[in-house]
Amino acid sequence: MQFKRRTVNQLADMVCGNFPAETTFFPYRSSKYITEFFQDVETDYEHDGSTRAAWVADVLAEILSEPQPGSGVPPESFARVIDRLMDPQDAVNEDSSRPGALSQLNASLAREGFQAFFAPDGRCYLKNVVTNEVAAPRPNPHRPFSAVEMERRERLVSYLEFASEDELIEDLLLPLFRQLGFQRITAAGHRDKALEYGKDVWMKYVLPTTHVLYFGIQAKKGKLDSSGVSKAGSANVAEILNQVAMMLGHEIFDPEIGKRVLVDHAFIVAGGDITKAARNWLGNKLDASKRSQILFMDREDIVNLFVVNNLPVPTLRAQVAGPVPF
């Protein structure tokens, strides 16, 4: 991705703090602190003693040339630069919400079709104003959680205990996959079972090479097992087999390109656990080519991804018998 040199130079001045002390919203950074700035964003750049703004502009241009996570967003390293630049603790001549700095930053980014904004977690993110795709350092769902995140995680687990299959799809999966960068997310008539062909949702993902992969989702509310007789609240993986075969074999129509296409991969999603035996049974029943197209996602995966992506915990649409432990 390339930004206009004017934009890059303005961003470099913000990093360096090259503004009059009485009017600036960005702290002045000497050579040492510029090096620390780029270490904070997980890069190895060290200032070589040359003109600070010109050196930073060259580094930013190099960062922007790195591979992109999506066709409409800049590289993750650049997203970290923006987040670090807008650290609330670096506020100068304003409060920690940094309205002046944000306005100045957005005046430059608007030229490139981006907008910076503060999310409820206090961090600054970039959004493509055309596609609304958010550029951010990729969250790690396997990292340790804070106490606040653990509390949200428990609320999500409680929600999944009571949520219906439609609520699982519409209130959890659709917002989650949108946040993860999937496009054209379409629920396939789950309520009336019309034209599902084995999938509850279909969507697509655009690779950095601009190639497109299509995905289908088959979602079940509870646990997915391989026992001979499933208990209440569980689904047998044998029920999934025909639905997966239909999903992979039936074409979907993508109105953006005006063509019918096959699903490349199938997500099997469960609001409960997916047992190891169920995964193995399904893998053994499918041939090698179809087996590589199957992706599993159980309650643990859903909850962890939801928390690290800072999505709001939904509320149940209907009252259930007894108190809901929220």
Image (cartoon, rainbow, N blue to C red):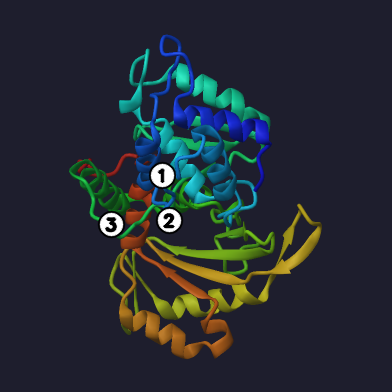
Q: Is residue 195 left or right of residue 219?
A: right
Q: Position of residue 196 (x, y in %)?
A: 61, 63
Q: Position of residue 236 (x, y in %)?
A: 38, 76
Q: Which mark is residue 38?
A: 1
Q: Which mark is residue 143?
A: 3
Packing grade of label 2 (10 A; few <14, some 14-19, many >=20) is some
Residue indicated by mark 2: 165
For the point 50% across and 75% down, the residue is 294
User: Which corner quadrant of the image does residue 318 belong to?
Assistant: top left
Foreground label between 2 and 1: 1
Q: Say what amino acid the circle numbered 2 marks.
A: Glu
Q: Which mark is residue 237?
A: none
**Which of the marked residues, 1 or 3, is nearer the chain's N terminus?**
1
Q: CA distance from mark 2 to mark 1?
A: 46 Å
Q: Position of residue 187 (x, y in %)?
A: 58, 53
Packing grade of label 3 (10 A; few <14, some 14-19, many >=20) is few
Q: Say what amino acid the circle numbered 3 marks.
A: Arg
Q: Say what amino acid the circle numbered 1 marks.
A: Phe
Q: Position of residue 266 (x, y in %)?
A: 54, 70
- Helix, strand or loop at disc 3? loop
Q: Which residue extends farthest top?
A: 22
Q: Is residue 173 above or below residue 31?
A: below
Packing grade of label 1 (10 A; few <14, some 14-19, many >=20) is many
Nearer to us in this view, 55 or 84: 55
